[in-house]
Amino acid sequence: MSALARFSNIFRRRGVRAGLLLLVCLGLIGALAAACGDSSDSDRPGDTLQMTYMGGFVPQSNLPFVAVYVAEDQGFFADEGLEVDIQHAGFTGSHKSLILAGEIDITTLPASEMLEVRANSGAPYVAVMLFGQRGDFGYAVLNSSGIESPADFAGRNVGYKGIVQSEFHAMLAAHNLTTADMNMIDVGFNPVVLVEQQVDVYPVFLSNEPDTLSRNLNQDISVFEAADYGVPTLGVVYLVTEEFLQDETNREKLTRFLRATVRAFEFSVDDPAAAIESTEKFLAEDPPPDLVHERFILDTEIANALSDLTRANGVGWFTQQQFRALADVLFDYGALENPIDVESAIDRSFLEDIHR
Amino acid sequence: MISEPVPDLDTFDAPEPRSRRLSRPDLRPTLTWILPPLVALLLLAVAVELWVRLGDVSIWLMPRPTAVVESFFVDFGRYFNEGLKTLAVSLGGLAIGTAAATLLAAGVAHSQMLERAVLPIAIMVKVTPVVALIPLFIIWLGHGWNPKIAIAALITYFPVLINAIAGFRDVDPRMHDFFRSVNASTWEIFRHLRWPAAVPYLFASLKISVTLSLIGAVVAEFFLSGQGGLGAVIWIEQNSLRLEQVFASVLMLTVIGVTLSTAVVVAERLFSWRLDQPVTAS
């Protein structure tokens, strides 16, 4: 019997024929699946990637936190093939160190603080997405105080929280004033000092303290923001490290993370009520969260995160000029001990790919 | 009827308290006194240095001890000046806390009713986290040094109170009966019997409270960091991730703490020796 005839006999056996048929079918299914995958998402590897995110405070409705909660709850991370371990630093500030030690992948920090730590300590932070197009600090006064502009701060008791912000110095300079023209008082973190009129001006975190003062403490207040007087200010950024960005897998993780959170950001702008519903699942249950307050935080931060720049380029957008202007103010008033190379402190390439 | 002469209480030689006393103060710092802690500290620093260097520990999580020591000496003037502010708050709080606790203990030692009324409140204040009280103290006492001193006092009073109560009550019942039998006044019993008995207890509590007062001062300075002090330095440098400066501040706190503790030990020896001397009428 020839070799060909022997092969033909083997092929005719029923079991072998069935096995071959199965192999061909599996091959076809595999090819079809690969073709479909290519056509729908050509730049995404199939593997699920893990990532650790740490919010820089306790869980609450700050937009950089909400974007992560919504992305997780609405399945945007899952769509990207990303599993995100969501953590919070609480009151410790540990996120600033843990990201440098490589214990977490991405975290949040106000842009000014990011620049200060990078310039003063050499921490290789890199901002990859900007939420607050304006700073998150303001200066509250009681409407009964007669203060109608920062020019009226002269001769008054003005509170500060540990450190007088550079933007406050700049705002005073815009009115030809310095802190020497007023009585500066270190007030800690309790807005009651304004209600009790121990100070005439109280520095507030815009996203929550005005609500506490007006709704919980029943005060009629006005809030002055440095940005309204031409002072360049910025809010919170997502940041990673230079070392993190040197790894290709990390860059892929970051791309997926930002794509999902940009989507969640847009979702939150379109439907803040639904964003709060997603957020509620991540808030502490005891005591029950004050959802009106949480909504105030989110609405305030959404308003601060949208500008002509983001409307033209997409949410989270930023420019080198914004960071340069902020760094100049920080340097002028001593917050930066050394000049900083702003270009190396920011990386917009991920957002450019996402918004292309 | 047999009458005994009534002793002059002003020249009465107070009984020996139950705790051991040195008859003479021995204040000479000896090698056996100084060397062991220094060697232990050095070994700990070497171990940490090796751990950081060989274990590839991130400098953002743990600074090298050599870098800490370098920062300590390079910026010594800053740590010293800020340390003086912390020391002032600490001593102010310690003085107020100790005085208040001693007075209260003296009252409690004489009155079971007062003890029942006051001790639960004292315990309630003790178990309240001082961190939660600081913002309130700032509102109540202003924005200067007062709230910081109050926090230091609050954190120090409890060990003194408990020890002082025990000390004031640690008198020989026979001696107490004797004082009563000679019609000694409450003040005389306190001065010649209860106070000498309480002194060792007070010094024992001061050894605890003196370091607690430093902790209270530093914690308060976290909240009022604009006024300086080592707590403010730690808070500011921690925010800037300059861990060498953070640990150098802790090193200065250690120096202050050891100095204060040593001062208490020396004061105890001096005071105990003085108590041992026969009391003469003034």
Image: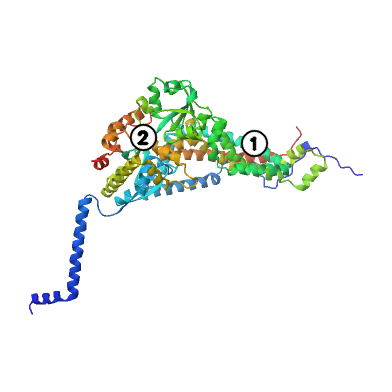
| SS assignment at label 1 | helix
**Residue A100 can be seen in this image:** no
Q: In this rendered view, identify the residue nearer to me: A262 or B52.
A: A262
The residue that disc 2 covers is A303
The quadrant where residue B122 appears: top right
Q: Are marks 2 and 1 on the same chain?
A: no
Q: Residue at x 33, y 29 (%)?
A: A328
Protein chain holding label 2: A
The quadrant where residue A293 appears: top left
State the mark number for residue A74. none
Q: Position of residue B263 (x, y in %)?
A: 58, 38
**Quarter holding the C terminus of chain A?**
top left
Protein chain holding label 1: B
Q: Residue at x 14, y 74 (%)?
A: A11
Q: Residue at x 22, y 54 (%)?
A: A37
Residue flagged by tag 2: what amino acid is it? Ala
Q: In this rendered view, identify the residue nearer to me: B89 or B28.
A: B89
Q: In this rendered view, identify the residue nearer to me: A87 or A277.
A: A277
Give how far apart the Cα atoms at labels 2 and 1 are. 55 Å
| SS assignment at label 2 | helix
Q: Is disc 2 surrounded by few (<14), some (14 to 19) or many (20+) residues within 10 Å?
A: few
Q: Position of residue B141 (x, y in %)?
A: 57, 31
Q: Is residue A286 left or right of residue B166?
A: left
State the mark number for residue B99. 1
Q: Position of residue B213 (x, y in %)?
A: 56, 39
